[in-house]
Amino acid sequence: KNEVEQSPQNLTAQEGEFITINCSYSVGISALHWLQQHPGGGIVSLFMLSSGKKKHGRLIATINIQEKHSSLHITASHPRDSAVYICAVPSNYGGATNKLIFGTGTLLAVQP
Amino acid sequence: NAGVMQNPRHLVRRRGQEARLRCSPMKGHSHVYWYRQLPEEGLKFMVYLQKENIIDESGMPKERFSAEFPKEGPSILRIQQVVRGDSAAYFCASSPLGSTGELFFGEGSRLTVL
């Protein structure tokens, strides 16, 4: 069964800073998800990636399949980026990719 | 194209009552996943359904919980005889491509058991 670790658990940044959140997992996967959750709010899927790098606006996600590691970067951070960022991977290799197990999340606070 | 719709957004029940949570997937999506987020804990997979079929319910508690996704209408997560430990946020997600597709999440249903 896969295990997921995220770091850091909490992150405080000043507006404009470049932010990196890391995710490591233990078992080979076919795809990895990055999700965003605002306090008391719903969940938004930011990225699903299986190799290389994806970019959407100020968000960039990278994955290294060999090293079982992914990073989420936020450029020119803004207070509205304050949220919990969650990494999720399939619970077992070769299984249903959306039967996910989730990291504990990284709570990001961007101060003006 | 409306997103994944969940209702109710907030539900309060007394111990022993039943809770029914509904999820309407995005148009064209026939695969639905339910996840639970207990207070101060991470998200956990509960069940994966396709129309009229339960594909994987390995994350569902053995008793009191059931899920369905009928041919017509929303998917329903049903909790019988609720206890305080059932208080949580329940999220539904849908996918167009089953187990390999991108997931689209709803806003969640927050259940409080008094």
Image (cartoon, coloured by chain):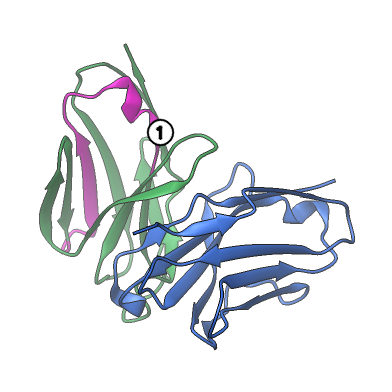
Q: Which chain is blue?
A: B
Residue B23: image quadrant is bottom right
- When the figure is inspected, residue A105 is found, relative to residue A8, above or below; the finding is below
Q: Residue furthest left?
A: A52
Q: Is residue B59 left or right of residue B32?
A: right
Q: Is residue A55 left or right of residue B85?
A: left
- Residue A62 position, x and y percent, is 16, 50
Instruction: Tell whether position A77 is magenta.
Output: yes
Q: Which stretch did the figure color magenta?
A: A65-85
- Closer to the camera in the image, A24 or B81: B81
- Residue B38 position, x and y percent, is 63, 50
Q: Residue at x 45, y 59 (%)?
A: B4
Residue A4: image quadrant is bottom left
Query: Given the image, on which type of amino acid does mark 1 rest?
Result: Ala
| Quadrant showing the C terminus of chain A | top left
Q: Is residue B19 left or right of residue B103?
A: right
Q: Residue at x 43, y 48 (%)?
A: A43
- Residue A73 position, x and y percent, is 20, 37
- When the figure is inspected, residue B102 is found, relative to residue B67, above or below; the finding is above
Indicate the chain on which mark 1 is placed: A
- When the figure is inspected, residue B105 is found, relative to residue B47, above or below; the finding is above
- Residue B93 position, x and y percent, is 45, 63
Name the residue that disc number 1 marks.
Answer: A83
Q: Residue furthest bottom?
A: B53
- Closer to the camera in the image, A29 or B16: B16
- Give the class, few, some or many, for how many residues have Cα within 10 Å of label 1's Cα (few <14, many ≥20): some
Instruction: Tell whether position B47 is magenta.
Output: no
Per the image, label 1 sits on a secondary structure element best described as strand
Residue B3: image quadrant is bottom left
Q: Residue furthest top?
A: A112
| Quadrant showing the N terminus of chain A | bottom left
The colour assigned to chain A within the rendered structure: green
